[in-house]
Amino acid sequence: MTRKTARSRKITYTVLFGLIFLAAIPMALINHQAAQALFSRLVSESGSHAVETMAYGPHPRHRLDIYTPTHRTTGRSAVEKRPIVLFLYGGGWRDGNREIYSFVGAALASRGITAIIPDYRTYPEVSFPGFIEDAAQAYYWAWKNLAESRPLIVMGHSAGAHSAAMIALNGDYLARLDAAIGRPAALIGISGPYSFDPTTWPSTRDIFSTAASADSARPAAHVDRNAPPALLLHGLKDTTVRLWNLETLSRNYRKAGQPVTAKTYPNLAHIDTILGIARPLRWRAPIFEDIIGFIERHSLP
C-alpha cells in the first residue's frame, strides 16, 4: 500500500467515523434549527432523489419539499406507479422545520417512494384546528398535483402523527377542500398522541382551548369503517407520549373491523423512533423496513 493510499483511507475513515458520531447525537440535544438541518443532511441518503420546493397555500409556512426518486435508480415508469407519502413532522404543535427531516424524504426516495414534507403553522400563530387544516391543505395539494391514480399515504411523528391521523380518520378536513378527495390510502403513525385529552393536558390545553370538545381533537375518537389501513409504531422507552395512545387507537381500529398493525421497539425513546429512519441508526430497530414493508403491502394498486 502506498503512503498516498494509506493517507486517503485514513481521511475516509475519519470522515466516516465523524458522521457516525454526529448521527449518534440525539436530535433533542441539537437546539438550533440550522444545526438540526445540517445533521439531517449528514445522515441522509444521497444521489437517489431530487428535491423541489413548492407553495401549497398563501402563508409563508405553506411550503413543501418534494423528494422524487431519480429515474436512474428506479425507472420513470416505476416512479409513476409508486405511492406518494406525505410526512408531517412533530414539535409539540409549537415549532418545527421541514429541512430538519430531509433524511426522511431521502430515505423514502431511495426506495422508490416520492415523499412530500410540508411546513405548517404552529401555536401561538394558530390554535387547533389550524395546523390540521394546513396538513389537509398540503395533502389536497399533493392529491391534486401529483397523485393522479397513485396511492397517497399520510405519515407523521409525534404531533405530526396526531395531525396525520386526524386527516385520515376525520373525513371532514379533506371533504371541505374537495368532496371527491376521499381518505388516504393508508396511515403510518410514529409515536403519536392519538388518545390523550389535549384540552386539559398542561402543555397543550392553550393550544387546544378552541376545540369544541376533547373528542373533537382526539384521533382515536374518529375511527369508523372508512378508516384506512394503519401502521402504528412506538418505542417502549418513550416517556413523552405513552404507549396507551397506540393501544387505544389500535383497539378502536379492531372494534371498527379495520386493518391495523401495531409494532413496539423495546430500546427506543420518543425521538429515537423517527431517527431510526436515518441510515446510520437503522441498526437499532427495523423501523424503516417495517414502514417500507407496510407501504408495499397496503398501498400498491
Image: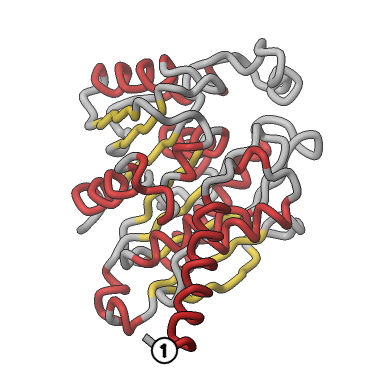
- Residue at 66% from the left image edge and 15% from the top image edge: 199
In the foreground, 8 or 216: 8
- Residue at 72% from the left image edge and 51% from the top image edge: 33
> For residue 280, which quarter of the picture?
bottom left
> For residue 38, which quarter of the picture?
bottom right
Left or right of residue 94: residue 82: left
- Residue at 35% from the left image edge and 17% from the top image edge: 247
**Where is residue 209 shown, x and y percent of the image?**
73, 19
Numbered-mark total: 1
Left or right of residue 57: residue 24: left
The relative height of residue 143 versus residue 161 in the rendered view (above or below) is below
- Residue at 25% from the left image edge and 32% from the top image edge: 261
In the foreground, 100 or 232: 100
| Location of the N terminus (image quadrant) | bottom left
In the foreground, 164 or 236: 236
The relative height of residue 100 versus residue 41 in the rendered view (above or below) is above
Q: Amino acid at mark 1?
A: Thr
The relative height of residue 261 versus residue 253 in the rendered view (above or below) is below
SS of the residue under disc 1 = loop
**Where is residue 109 shown, x and y percent of the image?**
39, 66
> Badge 1 is on which residue?
2
The colour mode here is: secondary structure
Please rate how many residues cluster around mark 1, counting C-alpha atoms within 10 Å: few if below 14, some from 14 to 19, many from 20: few
**Where is residue 113 shown, x and y percent of the image?**
35, 63
**Where is residue 11 shown, x and y percent of the image?**
53, 74
- Outermost residue on the top side: it is 200
In the foreground, 113 or 110: 110
| Location of the C terminus (image quadrant) | bottom left
